[in-house]
Image (spheres, rainbow, N blue to C red):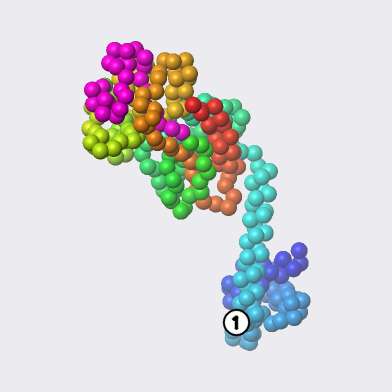
Amino acid sequence: MDSLSGFAVFVKIAEMGSLVAAGRALGISASAVGKSLIRLEEKLGVRLFHRNTRSLNLTAEGILFLERSRRILAEIEAAEMELSQAIKSPQGRLRVSLPLVSSLVLPVLGDFMQQYPEIALDLDFTDRLVDVIEEGFDAVVRTGVPTDSRLKASKLGSFRQLLVASPAYLMQHGTPTVPADLLKHVCLHYRFSHSGKLEQWPLKQAGDEADLQLPISMICNNIETRLCFALKGRGIACLPDFAIKTFLDDKQLVQVLPEFVDRTGVFYILWPASKHPSPKVRALVDFLSQRMFETSDV
């Protein structure tokens, strides 16, 4: 520990440029700073500073040792922070931005609240591309490959997009056998809130089918509306598998053109980059990673 104290004193001298200023910053006398420096130099067997009455400058050995000392002290500080965070229980307000997929996240977040009663969830549901740091979010859940270097990311799981309709609708309107058949059907569409554009259906097409302009019979910006209308036999919808697994299992919905549909998405949780995220953020990341997709596979 005496050696570590010597490192800290040495770094402070190098930063402040004088023994007096270093002592003032450390809350000790200039004499104590000088003695600590002498002990360190004697132990290392080198001079770390060129000293005279007017100046204090690092030697070549001192420059090298300063870099190493800073690294050592940073590692010690990080270890102390890690230990301190580890013994703290997750608590406090946790502000999270989530996509409009309540059927996937709400049951899991309900269980999270039960397990961590000292965390107060502040949830914002939107498909808008939020600025995590500027808008003060602790974490966000989003699809797509993360690109912001200021954020850390952890993959939560993947999902598939499927075209589905009710048996009653298909009995009345017929079952499409190729993508071009969709031109004669009622198509229920999704519009991205942040861009205003319609989501393109993930159809594998060729030749004349490549530029299909699908009928637009209904547009909305959430999953629940399209799911409700599909269940009521109002048309064909493109929906993520986690939202319709139960309805596929009990035959309330059936897949349409499964051999022509090909799109997989990935959910990530992202949070501001830090060597040691707060206990509440770490708890959320671990919980969602373990639970969010544990029963969602189709």
Q: Quadrant of residue 13?
A: bottom right
**Residue at 72% over, 66% down:** 4
In percent of width and height, residue 199 lies at 31, 34
* Location of residue 252 with respect to 194 vertically, above or below: above
Q: Quadrant of residue 219?
A: top left
In percent of width and height, residue 153 lies at 51, 46
Residue beneath label 1, please? 57
Residue bounds of the magenta highlight: 159-185
Q: Answer whether residue 261 is visible to the viewer in this image.
A: yes
Nearer to me, 165 or 280: 165
Nearer to me, 294 or 52: 294
Nearer to me, 86 or 152: 152
Q: State yes or no: residue 172 in magenta.
A: yes
Numbered disc 1: secondary structure: strand
Q: Answer whether residue 218 is visible to the viewer in this image.
A: no
In percent of width and height, residue 276 lies at 59, 50
- In the rendered structure, the answer to whether residue 127 lies left or right of residue 211 reads right
**Residue at 63% over, 56% down:** 78
* Location of residue 270 with respect to 55 vertically, above or below: above
- In the rendered structure, the answer to whether residue 40 lies left or right of residue 157 reads right
- In the rendered structure, the answer to whether residue 60 lies left or right of residue 128 reads right
